[in-house]
Image: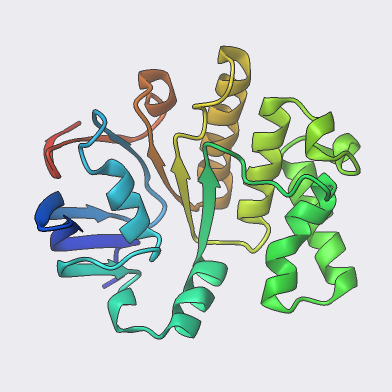
Amino acid sequence: MEQPAIKFENVWKIYKLGRVEVPALRGLNIEIKRGEHVAIMGPSGSGKSTFLHLAGALDRPTRGRVLIEGRDPSKMSDEELSRLRNELIGFVFQTFNLIPRLTALENVMLPLAIKGVNGEERMRRAKEALEMVGLARRMNHRPIELSGGEQQRVAIARAIVTSPRIILADEPTGNLDSASAAEVVDLLTRLNRELGVTLVVVTHNPETAAPAKRIVRMRDGVVYEEN
């Protein structure tokens, strides 16, 4: 039986602020199948960003278990975690996180350099990724020379260049105007449909969530509604 892309089993995440314990997740149970397009919605403080950090193996649960394609990141070494993230997961953040002095092409090549891919292959795959997001003519421009929507598309190209099986997007349209936001949502939806990647989008924007096949609403660290 095929393992789900992401599975949370009674997951608690508790942050300590001095002597005060603040639970961000309270026994969260959720399963996301491979190839699914899921939107996670909820107000500020609902636990959705904490969910994304755990789903991306960027943090460990206080209690319970997170499984990524059947693997438990809490049992991995730092080196194994880095390999898991680099090979399996692509991240798209609200703030783009591009390196200003590098061109779009060089930004997209970075994850492949970390992975040890040779220079010629890095360039070929980075160009393919930028072509896929419609930026073939802008690949030699630096971030300051690109619009917000174009910068986010560079970030998406960087996320897919390693051929991940899971894309985690944290408020990917939060810093964009409505037209650019619609383009980014369409692009992510197309990647899910055409490449078969599992797509999880954390957002407070109903328009960003609308194309998802499943919308999960969180509140106080648990799921309270799905549709």
Residue 61: x percent and y percent? 22, 66
Residue 106: x percent and y percent? 82, 55
Q: Residue at x 67, y 27 (%)?
A: 149
Q: Nearer the viewer, residue 198 or 75?
A: 75
Q: Residue at x 38, y 22 (%)?
A: 205
Residue 8: x percent and y percent? 20, 60
Q: Residue at x 77, y 60 (%)?
A: 109
Q: Nearer the viewer, residue 61 or 87?
A: 61
- Judge left or right: residue 68 versus residue 18: right
Q: Quadrant of the N terminus?
A: bottom left
Q: Quadrant of the C terminus?
A: top left
Q: How many marks?
A: 0
Residue 9 against residue 93 in the figure, above or below: below
Q: Quadrant of residue 55?
A: bottom left
Q: Quadrant of residue 7?
A: bottom left
Q: Residue at x 10, y 53 (%)?
A: 20
In this figure, which colouring scheme has been used for the structure? Answer: rainbow
Residue 26 visible in this rendered orientation of the protein: no
Most extreme residue toward the top is: 178
Residue 61 against residue 70 in the figure, above or below: above
- Judge left or right: residue 91 versus residue 214: right
Residue 63: x percent and y percent? 13, 68
Residue 142 visible in this rendered orientation of the protein: yes
Residue 213 against residue 197 in the figure, above or below: above
